[in-house]
Amino acid sequence: MLQGLLRAEGHCVGRRHVATLMKKMGIEALYRRPNTSKPAPGHKIYPYLLRNLPVIRPNQVWAMDITYIPMARGFVYLAAVVDWFSRRVLSWRLSITLEASFCIDAVEETLARHGEPDIFNTDQGSQFTSLDFTKVLKEAEIAISMDGKGAWRDNVFVERLWRTVKYEEVYLHAYASVPEARAALARYLTFYNTRSPHSSLDRRTPDQAYFNPPQPIPVAA
């Protein structure tokens, strides 16, 4: 990603050189994080629907997850809805608690702005298995998919997003307040959607992949 940004600004540099410079910078951090995916006894768990499923277009599959955001004092929680095909962050919310309401707000905003996906994938956290959350998806006739217990790889694209957000934005700052964190994350996620190239998207940005997906080649008659 950094190589793509540098090339876009006119700097001819290879991936190995970028990797060498990053290693010399020594930006490595391991953070103990609060558990954001605690299941709730009695809540229904839905099967994982994405295994071996080819995802070939925007709005086919959306995924949602929650992560913690450390601040100068304490931390807050970030939830995001991500389009699986394009990696685009469709909506997000910041909260000081893990109640389901901030997740529901993000989903309802995404549905209002982008329509309905075929499948909506989450982990088995109590926010996502709650009746209020699943009701929103059921009323929109969206198939509900949930990761296997402890299987972070089932939602790997969102896990990669969290790593990117934290290493490129959050860990470089110590937000003094929730409004400061919200404003900084808004700037970064706009950058991520509009300017950050992805190797898995043929060096396109999430916005480019979402709004201008490849067109299928028509079959000759």
Image (cartoon, grey):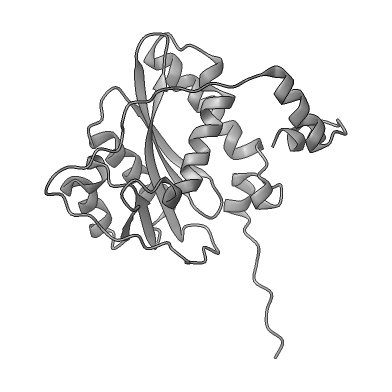
Establish if 88 lies above or below 10: below
Picture coordinates of residue 82, whole percent (x, y): 46, 46
197 or 50: nearer the viewer: 50
Q: Tell me which residue sits at (52%, 40%) in the image.
A: 160
Most extreme residue toward the left is 42
Q: Is residue 174 left or right of residue 21?
A: left
Q: Is residue 21 left or right of residue 28?
A: right
Picture coordinates of residue 134, whole percent (x, y): 23, 52
Establish if 119 lies above or below 88: below
Most extreme residue toward the bottom is 221
- Quarter of the image containing the N terminus? top right
Picture coordinates of residue 221, whole percent (x, y): 70, 91
Residue 109 found in image quarter:
top left
Residue 71 found in image quarter:
top left
Q: Is residue 199 left or right of residue 150?
A: right
State whether residue 62 appears in this view. Answer: yes
Tally of numbered discs = 0
Establish if 93 lies above or below 65: above
State whether residue 189 appears in this view. Answer: no
Picture coordinates of residue 41, whole percent (x, y): 13, 45
Q: Tell me which residue sits at (22%, 48%) in the image.
A: 129
